[in-house]
Image (tube, rainbow, N blue to C red):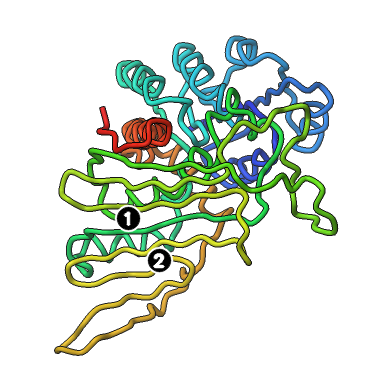
Amino acid sequence: MSKLRIGMVGLGSMSARHVDAIRKCSQMELSAICTRSASNLNERANLWGVSKTYLNYEDMLLESDIDAVVIITPNKFHAPMTMTALKAGKHVFCEKPPAMSAAEVKEIMEYANGSGKVLMYGFMLRFSRKYNFIRELREKGMFGEIYFAKAGIIRRSGNPGGWFTYKEMSGGGPLIDLGSHIIDLSLYLMGDYEPVSVFARTFKQTENLDNIKEHSSYKAINVNNYSNDIEEMALVVINFNNGACLVVETSNVSHIKDDTMFLEMLGTKGGITVDPKMEIHTSYQNYLMDIIPQVDCTGFDYQAAIDNEICHFGDCIINNVECIASAKSGLKLMKIIDTAYESADRGKLIEIR
């Protein structure tokens, strides 16, 4: 069988990881690339050995013989590019967040369902060996029913700069950016519960740190002529239809000692600290027990997760495998994020519509 011909649009920092994943997948080949920067396009074409290059996305869809597209662009373009590709008869893998709003995802999902084409979103944490090991334990009943979880990604000076700071392009700050990952992962591990209401607070109160010296990882808040009109921090409480609750913190800029990612879940039979270090907390024969799993997948492998998700995308297309990062999961996430921003604006609990 011939390989799936992949076209990629958006050649930013994440594109190299996706190219590596495509090349590792025996059923795919990178056939065409597209970006608005001619210099970047030529540089990447030479680096990756790709002959079909485009400055216009519609031209790539029309002129190239690709079967599917991988979209890695600023958030504003996710929905329109996804819909355009589907209407052109292409399968679509789109990086997170799925869109700028739940309404956009709903429209795209309805079209995709009738098109016969695969639509998959880039929730790469779902493809980590570590997190799937934990999901397996939960599905086998080790923790009982999960009734509470808390999760977060907090950065000391992690504002990405550029279009990320411009709400019209990004849709928001760390809530839609980091939150897309940590909220989706929490839903995936807890059991894909149905969210019913959200209460949220957002903050933008840390003084501007763009003059920080001797700190190479820092990204200035105001760069590339973009304004900084996004939140710096968000706190979100998500309630589910079975009474369970998830509390999420995200931040790009906070006065903390170290960047941190954390996730803990409590169940009726036991709890688990997922991050930063995997440890199970339970009881046995009337004794409290802390268990450290002796497995190889105790850490998160960034590239391996992307490799796995891209290969899964190919399996969904060729072998009709059920997509585990589908439009349905994208819609659920965006409903939560939409409602969280509305709750923060209105200062009260909002039911998900």
Specify few, some or many for label 2: CA neighbours under 10 Å numbering under 14, 14-19, or 20 or more. Answer: many
Q: Which mark is residue 189?
A: 1
Residue type of the residue flagged with mark 1:
Leu
Q: Look at the picture and state if 50 lies above or below 267.
A: above
Label count reads 2
Q: Left or right of 331: which side holds 41?
A: right
- The one nearer the camera, 38 or 266, is 266
SS category of the residue bearing label 2: strand
SS category of the residue bearing label 1: helix
* Residue 147 rendering spot, x and y as whole percentages: 22, 58
* Residue 236 rendering spot, x and y as whole percentages: 39, 46
Q: Quadrant of residue 20?
A: top right
Callouts 2 and 1 close, C-beta under 8 Å: yes
Q: Earlier in the sequence, mark 2 or mark 1?
A: 1
- The one nearer the camera, 223 or 91, is 223
- The one nearer the camera, 169 or 49, is 169
Q: Which residue is mark 2?
A: 274
Q: Quadrant of residue 213?
A: bottom right
The quarter of the rendered structure image containing the C terminus is top left
Residue type of the residue flagged with mark 2:
Val
